[in-house]
Image: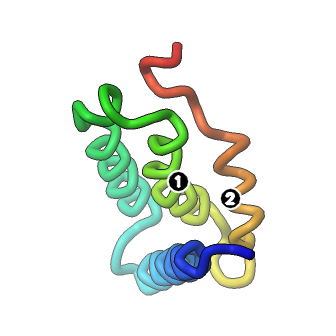
Amino acid sequence: MMNPANLQIEGLLMAVASLNQLLVGKGIVSGDEIDVALRKAEARVTGDDRFFEEIPLASRDAMCFPIRLLLLANKAEPGDGMPGFSALAKLVGQTKQPFNDQR
């Protein structure tokens, strides 16, 4: 049985992705601006000293997952062109790069 918190996070991520598309569609922000904001968020998360010193690899991936999913959703076509959560999650796994201390 899946943890209900995971389902809540799944729903929240898809809601944020839809809101991002709405904002882009209304011309309030551009897709590029959302991309930059999300990349800055990921840089803040991965730039924290404890990220490499104290946090296990699987937990690092968990911390970056929502940001990476939203980055991929941001590239999707507006409206019904956005893949579902499962497809986006799979893409996150397929496209993730190693962290700096893994090279």
**Seen in the image, is 84 located left or right of residue 30?**
right
Say if residue 21 shows up in the picture.
no
Q: Secondary structure at mark 1?
A: helix
Residue 46 vertical placement versus 36 (above, below): above
Q: Residue furthest front?
A: 1
Q: Which residue is mark 2?
A: 89
Pick the quarter of the image with the N terminus: bottom right
Residue 63: percent from the left, percent from the top? 43, 51
Q: Are marks 2 and 1 in contact (CB under 8 Å)?
A: yes
Looking at the image, tell me whether mark 2 or mark 1 is earlier in sequence order. Answer: 1
Q: Residue at x 55, y 64 (%)?
A: 74
The residue singled out by tag 1 in the image is 65
Q: Give the colour scheme of this rendering.
A: rainbow
| Horizontal relation, residue 39 to residue 96: left or right | left
Along the viewing direction, whichever of 42 and 52 lies nearer the viewer: 52
Amino acid tagged 1: Phe
Label 2: few (<14), some (14–19) or many (≥20) C-alpha neighbours in 10 Å: some
Asked if residue 8 shows in the view, the reply is yes
Q: Which residue appears at 32% of the width and 35% of the height?
A: 51
Please state which amino acid type lies under the numbered disc 2. Answer: Ala
